Amino acid sequence: MRKITLLLASVLLFSCGEEKKILLPKADVTLVKQVDDLSTIDMFFSVENKDTIADVSKNTVITTTNWVFNIDKRLPLKSILPDIVKLQEKKRKKSKGEVATTQNYYSYADSIGKNLAFLGFTNIQYKLQKPVEGIVVFIDKKNRILVNDSVVERKDLEKHIIRINQDLKPVHYGFDKNMLYGNYLLNKLFLNAMELKTVGSEEYVY
């Protein structure tokens, strides 16, 4: 029997007597507190020939359940996105022509409730390229924010975008492919707190 337990900012996974650890991102923002009827996809930090890779355990992934991705915060986006994209496509094909009732979530450690919390990403479509139109909000691996290649302070970002986007062009979020997943999730929580009208469902990683 498989058991998941949160310990501080890590997830301990017990399977067939084997213990593995995933270091989760930690945040003081709670969006979703509980997910029921779920399957988990675990991505462990691993080093192979001096390269950081994701050791992926899909367990028993059932397409008719909610999916929770437990991902080690030390993994770069380029090592986890290929698997995430494949799994998303698999689920979409299975539910083609049907009303989608299940969701996909990233898990993280809730530093307030001292428990797991979740960030939904069901409708996000990842593109491994640079967007060619609209306003591009790009966050590099050092967590600098560039809007159409101009550096903008975090505290000014929402007002800046509203000011330069009076004609409501599409706003695209982009991330450095070498950004660590932990930083990506914290940046996503930050971006989700903004109330922008024209943000698309595509996210660009390059």
Image: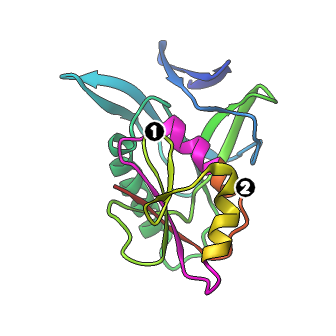
With respect to residue 200, does 10 lie above or below?
above
Per the image, label 2 sits on a secondary structure element best described as loop
- Return the x and y of residue 146 as percentages of the image width and height: 49, 56
Determine the image quadrant of residue 52. top left
With respect to residue 25, does 69 lie above or below?
below
Per the image, label 1 sits on a secondary structure element best described as loop
Determine the image quadrant of residue 205. bottom left
Which mark sits nearer the N-terminus, 1 or 2?
1
Q: Nearer the viewer, residue 65 or 33?
A: 33
Residue 69 magenta:
no
Q: Nearer the viewer, residue 155 or 9?
A: 155
Mark 2 is surrounded, within 10 Å at the Cα level, by few (under 14), some (14 to 19) or many (20 or more) other residues, namely: few
State the quadrant of the N terminus: top right
Q: Which mark is residue 142?
A: 1
Mark 2 sits on what residue? 193
Point out the residue furthest to the bottom here: 167
Question: What are the residue bounds of the magenta stretch?
Answer: 165-189
State the quadrant of the C terminus: bottom left
Determine the image quadrant of residue 101. bottom right
* Apparent side of residue 85 relative to residue 105 in the rendered image (left or right): left
Residue positioned 61% across, 25% down in the render = 4
Proximity of marks 1 and 2: CB atoms separated by less than 8 Å: no
Label 1 and label 2: CA atoms lie apart by: 21 Å
Residue 177 magenta:
yes
